Image: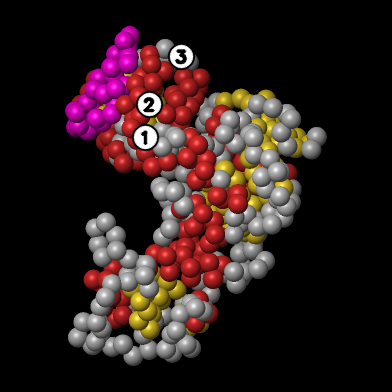
Amino acid sequence: MEPCYLNELLPYVSISGKNILVKGVSIDSRTTVKDDIYFAIKGNRYDGHDFIKDAVSRGACAVIYSKDMHFDEQNVGSLNKVAMIKTKDAVVTLGEIARVYIEKFKNIKKVGITGSNGKTTTKEMLSSILKTKVKTLSNKGNFNNRIGLPLSVFNLDSYVNYGVFEMGTSFFGEIKILSNIIKPDVGVITNIGFSHIEEFKSLEGVLREKIDLFYNVKENGVLVVNNDDENLKYISDKNFKNKTIIRYSLKTASSDVYANNIKMSQNGTSFSLCYNEESIDIFIPAKGVFNVSNALAAASCAISLNVPFANIKMGLESFISPKMRMDTITTSNAIILINDSYNANPSSTKASIETILELYPDKKINLVLGDMLELGENSDKFHFELGKFIDNKNVNSISLLGDKSLNVANAINSKNVFYAKDKESLLLHLKKLTENDSVFLFKASRGMKLEEVYEKFCDILQ
């Protein structure tokens, strides 16, 4: 964070000691340092208000809090030169301050990315492209919500040329809040799928939430649209006047940016990137046609920012895939393990299974699947449909974990299916399947923590 004065960040709040210099922000008293603003945020396990004294002792110059509290030297410590500011909601204030801070940087081009699948990978691909030219900032990991995104914004400084911000959502209105903080020059929605369908009820609800990103893109900005998505392809200039639309597609050359000659291998995927009668051959170190779609989304953003094809190729080919997205290792006895357990919904799970079947046609495919979470009242139906999908595929075995996955088992008639009540019994079963020429795909929603089984299985085989 570049140093600035507290009254600059909170122009609408009366603050005593307006010349307080701020050099950082913190939501964790353990990492608070001198001249930080400390935000006392109440979480699921901890309440930041309980640690205000610790934050002040570590040098916080200001504290944002929301509870009714009395402060004196006994319960806080020395209040000399510390601004104690009460607001209705510390999380809301964190976002408001981030919005004020980001507006200081008039020359930074900002990209906002959301979608049901692929938004993190698209963010990493675009960041890799832009970093071939100039300094680029992106939010790390899953810092894509009302706390993580503002904290990412405070990493900006005057040396940054591009800011790439992934935006997640778990309730109606969150994308509107996040995109209003960023006010992006370019917005991309990767796709509309069944993630968080428990909250949004339908694909129409998911679209209604995600589309707020496009409404908050600046005038004369760019909207990047996945022309292969049935819910997005009908977005038109009539809905978004004074904004340019760039469409990308795996399937049709009538889109602005498209792919030709897609070829998958066990090391990655090659394709020709096409735009305006130009084309360039690219190899991305990522498996799956869905990752070509992510690459097209990233390339479309880069094209809108006037990045040359050569830099796009360089960035995509040097891209490092996020963890637990088709991570692949081959053990000493030639068994292939693929960890795709970062998250899962019906469309992403089916896409991963189809990718593995295409990549390893001569091997014994073993599916290790956990529950797909947050699918709402139709969760049983979605899991049953996944089972019917698998029932028609050439797989060696299906090992399942989680209450909802029992519906997957009930839909499968002709395969070797094992349903585990817990991770320990799942691991014991997997030990029996370690035949030569075997491939294991691990896929589940993040909350299932299926990577724990994957890691223990790796240790056993290694």
Give the residue displayed 69% in from the left and 33% down from the top: 258
Front position in the image: 298 or 322: 298
- For the residues labelled 2 and 1, the Cα–Cα distance comes to 8 Å
Question: Which amino acid type corresponds to the residue marked 3 in the rendered image?
Answer: Asp
326 magenta-colored: no
Q: Which residue is mark 2?
A: 382
Question: Which amino acid type corresponds to the residue marked 2 in the rendered image?
Answer: Phe
Q: Residues within 10 Å of mark 1 (few under 14, many from 20)?
A: many
Counting from the top left corner in percent of width and height, residue 318 is at 59, 44
Q: Which residue is mark 1?
A: 375
Q: Disc 3 or disc 1, which is closer to the eye?
A: 1
SS of the residue at dot 3?
loop
Q: Disc 3 or disc 2, which is closer to the eye?
A: 2
Disc nearer the start of the sequence (3/1): 3
Q: Residues within 10 Å of mark 3 (few under 14, many from 20)?
A: few
Counting from the top left corner in percent of width and height, residue 291 is at 55, 35
Please provide the residue range marked out in magenta: 402-426
Q: Which residue is mark 3?
A: 362
